Amino acid sequence: MTVLPDDGLELAGEFPDVPHEQWQRLVAGVLRKSGKDVEGAAAEEALSTALEDGLRTRPLYTAHDSAPEPGLPGFAPFVRGARAEGNTVGGWDVRQRHTVADRDAVLGDLENGVTSLWLTVGDGGIAVPDLDRVLDGVYLDLAPVVLDAGRDTEPAARELLRVYEERGVARDAARGNLGADPLGYEARTGQRCDTAPAAELARLCAGEYPGLRALTVDALPYHEAGGSAAQELGCSLATGVAYLRELSGAGLDVEQACAQLEFRYAATADQFLTIAKLRAARRLWARVAEVCGAPRAGAQLQHVVTSPVMMTRRDPWVNMLRATIATLAAGAGGADAVTVLPFDHALGLPDAFARRIARNTSTILIEESHLARVIDPAGGSWYVERLTDELAHAGWEFFQRIERLGGMPAALRSGDLERDLAETWQARAGLLAKRREPITGVSEFPFLAEKPVVRASAPEPRSGGLPRVRRDEAYEALRARSDAHLAATGSRPRVFLAALGPAAAHTARLTFASNLFQAGGIEPVTEGTFEESGATEAVLCSSDALYAEQAEAVVRDLKAAGARHVFLAGRPGEYPGVDAYVFAGCDAVAVLSATLDRMGVVS
């Protein structure tokens, strides 16, 4: 926590203390002007924001919002960082992902700011025999290599070790991770994977390669299946504990086993939740190590990846903003290594420009924003400390649920875990459909005339297990229907926006309706008459006062002109002839899907 200097200076010392109740009364007065008659704690609650996992973000945090002492960086419970120096020496490890055998791309990244490589090998990636060629020219004693080889982990690891020996890399100079993750592979594919090779690799690394780790605890499969932050934490703990059991049974002690694990988490554009998640993850793993009798081995090594779930295919340039916020959160949260997915990740194989922007995102935050110069910059914030504590409790609760199911392998194979994740995603999908969780460039401010960004096809990712979801998937399906209609007919489906009265009366709702229908690939027409628009449906846009005066007559005229369906932009009311209403919080996906159906746009 922040310690004030003992110099006699009391900030705000001349100001009287303001009781919390006084602030609540002021909030109640403001809310009363907007039509909400609430008092006291209810007024504060009205400004709170609901998060997943039953958590809430309150509008005000004070010193009375207690949270456990986070400790010091480099010391248990490691909330403030796994190392005493944090990332202050040279910033976090900038780790770039490669899925194809492109040696030039690998060298180009390393020559321009990337400090380690994350290679997808085997199915959906680089062939094992190509590792030698891909790493040709790489200084393997300087650039750590992390493998993600699935079922091919053992041959890939042996090939990498052979390359180290052939290039003369000393065993104590090799750095990285061999990437064994049998439970992560099962989560991705639904296929069981033998854990014995992972244990053998762990024994090898523990005995001969002090700078290499053998196993990855990858929480991305659960995040990409729609899991919440607490579920991601719980799954990572359950997987880590399963690996500790396996390695202990193979002859390693707890400290040796902990030293063989690297944890991988997702960073989203919700920066405070990401910061809190990474801090909570370290605290929780420290607790696991303590219970296992090795409290000094509880410093969690974290590899953080910008979330694939948040990446959009439409207006992909906005992904740069999302990735920047996520990277900032990962750095502020104390990640040891960060992978920034290129902005065109969802479209296929990233090009050189996209890879450059991805690696430069970390470089700018480290070298120009100096984000790594402060250890745990969010520490001491009443909000962040409280959120970290609440998220840690929620994550531990989900971990206990998995353990009650028999542990991670049993939870995966019974389908219970998949059902839990699906339930969470269903709730979130409802918020996305109602645009309560807006997606810039997709559900908000879409641009129908944008030029598509085309990329070469990327290798098919591993599949067959937990699903992979995306925030934009419902809107992407609607836009794909519109694109097919455009290709078949030469024009997009259209809707006529009938603006009533002066601009001051109709602009807000006309803009709202235009954004709404474009999110489904429906082109809004605002000029000319309904007959000239080529549309079959119309939307009334104006103020409530003008609706009361003109709506009935305008609806009658529109239907006489051929409108088959007439919307009104605003809250449902008693307006004769209006067929449906569109308003903030309506189910946009349902409205748009039904509209395309009526227009004959095939799915």
Image: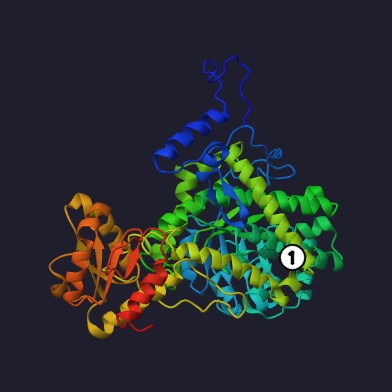
Residue drawn 29% across the image and 80% down it: 599
Crowdedness of circle 1 by 10 Å Cα count: few (<14), some, many (20+)?
many
Q: Say left or right for 317 vs 463.
A: left
Horizontal and vertical percent for residue 251? Answer: 87, 65
Under tag 1, what secondary structure? Answer: helix
Residue 174 visible in this rendered orientation of the protein = no
Q: Say left or right for 238 vs 570.
A: right
Looking at numbered disc 1 in the image, what kind of residue is underneath it?
A: Ile
Q: Name which quarter of the figure residue 434 lies in.
A: bottom left
Give the position of the C terminus as an image quadrant: bottom left
Horizontal and vertical percent for residue 219? Answer: 64, 64
Foreground residue, 120 or 306? 306
Foreground residue, 21 or 507? 21
Residue 177 visible in this rendered orientation of the protein = yes
Horizontal and vertical percent for residue 234? Answer: 69, 60
- Mark 1 highlights which residue? 402
Foreground residue, 245 or 598? 598
Residue drawn 25% across the image and 77% down it: 564
Residue drawn 62% across the image and 70% down it: 148
Foreground residue, 16 or 215? 16
